[in-house]
Image (spheres, rainbow, N blue to C red):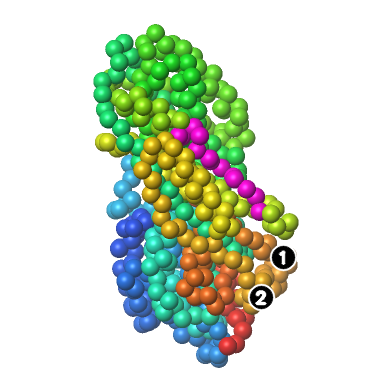
Amino acid sequence: MNNTELKPACVFEQFAAINQIPRPSKREEKMIEFLKNFGESRGLETKVDETGNVLIKKPATPGYENRQTVILQSHMDMVCEKLVDIEFDFDNDPIQTYIDGEWLCAKGTTLGADDGIGCAIEMAILDSNDLKHGPIECVFTRDEETGLTGAEGMKGDFMTGDMLINLDSEDEGQIFVSCAGGRTTAAYLKYTREEAPAGYFFMKIALKGLVGGHSGDDINKKRANSIKILTRFIYKEMQKMPVRIAQFNAGKLHNAIPRDGIVTFAVPADMKETVRADWNVFAAEVKDEFHVTEKTMDFTMESADAVKVMNEDASNRLVRALQAIDNGVFAMCQDEDLAWLVETSSNIASVETLDECVKMVASQRSNVMSNLDNQANTIKALFELAGCEVEQGDGYPAWKMNPNSQLTKTVVESYKKLFGKDPKVLGIHAGLECGLFSERYPNLDMVSFGPTLRGVHSPDERLHIPTVQMVWDHLLDILDNIPAK
């Protein structure tokens, strides 16, 4: 497939333009200005709220003025992840894309299709003059990836539509009608620095090449977590000898399964060969354990320069906390029809050694808010037992399915008519902005769908090109068949 086969061309032209605009989460100012200029230059009513969300209105096609107003919504920010050996400045450099068969990929970075492709679809609709639709509000929210703060900051009178289609899902043919709520737990373990005991030898272990992925949607896929793997080894060695941690750094994003990490530590010099032998055995065992999901795990060990280490008590508490922390699926949904869906989970996402403390971040998710509260408290209690200072945000709510959704009926009927098969109507174990919209706009009828993405939140992110055309055709048919007010 070459560039001339990127269809629909109107969508991919907009996506190419978007990928020239830096848009890291919380630093979307250039994208906000780009969208504002886009709407105003086409004579469309455009507004930006106090939070930085952008809304562009498009009037109905003649004859469609009495249709219910549809909100098309996507988020403008992107996860900024890159390969460790790639030089890239997400605040200034454009995303470089290439085609690999039926997939659109990026060169060593995240692609930005989450959710740039949703933005591109909206912009293509705003830019078109030959479509049939009722009144449309195109909404572009900021900072979805690191806290949903755009949706959180939106006031109840910003959007005025009757129905909302969220374009931030990642499997074509799946229509999402509910999502998990989530909360982030940050823990700070204070320590003091001191010289390592006499006769200690410094070593550095590193792990890279993991698949990683979305900490909600991918949490049940038996993918390795670099923090948990590195901790497993250090904890095992602590059962044999005293170990002093100098640095522990792994993971970057609160909503991603960590793909790499480095630990620098010191052990008695007469035990260093034992540690090396243990590392080789451990690496082989872990590779075998994850032989299906992790094809490119890379374990390395090397000697390290002597530096000051954490005091003994802090070293021990850090490793024990990371060994004990609940990670992965906690519970599956109890409803028989949703037994395949993860209900509650937690992911230890990052460890960062700062000057006077180690910062650890974990994210909890659940489709049941009482169990989200329980899981968040479980993680909090573990960190408290380790002597950490713990901070938890309010999180974001789950989005409950509306069994009487008129929009869902329209979306499903349209899909069956176009493609001759039933779509899957599902819930998702990830946070969608629909959860927050459901609080501020309780009468808003909502669904979420989008083209197929893989490897999201990682440099392996890729977009299945043929599904963009399918989503485009589906969306246009839905807009043509939205019922009257």
Residue picked out by circle 1: 422
Whether residue 308 is visible, yes or no, is yes
In space, the residues marked 1 and 2 are separated at their CA atoms by 18 Å
Mark 1 in CB contact with mark 2 (< 8 angstroms): no
Q: Which residues are magenta?
A: 321-333
Q: Position of residue 437 (x, y in %)?
A: 49, 70
Instruction: Give the vertical position of 124 relative to 360 (above or below).
Output: below
Instruction: Give the vertical position of 318 relative to 381 (above or below).
Output: above
Q: Position of residue 206 (x, y in %)?
A: 42, 28
Instruction: Give the vertical position of 31 relative to 256 (above or below).
Output: below
Q: Earlier in the sequence, mark 1 or mark 2?
A: 2
Q: Amino acid at mark 2?
A: Asn
Task: State the residue at coordinates (58%, 69%).
Answer: 447
Pick whichever, 50 or 386, lies toward us. 386
Q: Amino acid at mark 1?
A: Asp
The crowd level at tag 2 (other Cα within 10 Å; few <14, some 14-19, many 20+) is few
Does dot 1 land on a helix, a strand or a loop?
loop
Task: State the residue at coordinates (46%, 30%).
Answer: 320
The quadrant in which residue 427 appears is bottom right
Does the magenta portion include 30?
no
Q: Would residue 294 appear left or right of 152 to someone viewing this image? A: right
The quadrant in which residue 384 appears is top left
Per the rendering, the mark at residue 404 is: 2
Pick whichever, 364 or 274, lies toward us. 364
Task: State the residue at coordinates (32%, 71%).
Answer: 50
Q: Position of residue 82 (x, y in %)?
A: 40, 43
Does dot 2 land on a helix, a strand or a loop?
loop
The crowd level at tag 1 (other Cα within 10 Å; few <14, some 14-19, many 20+) is some
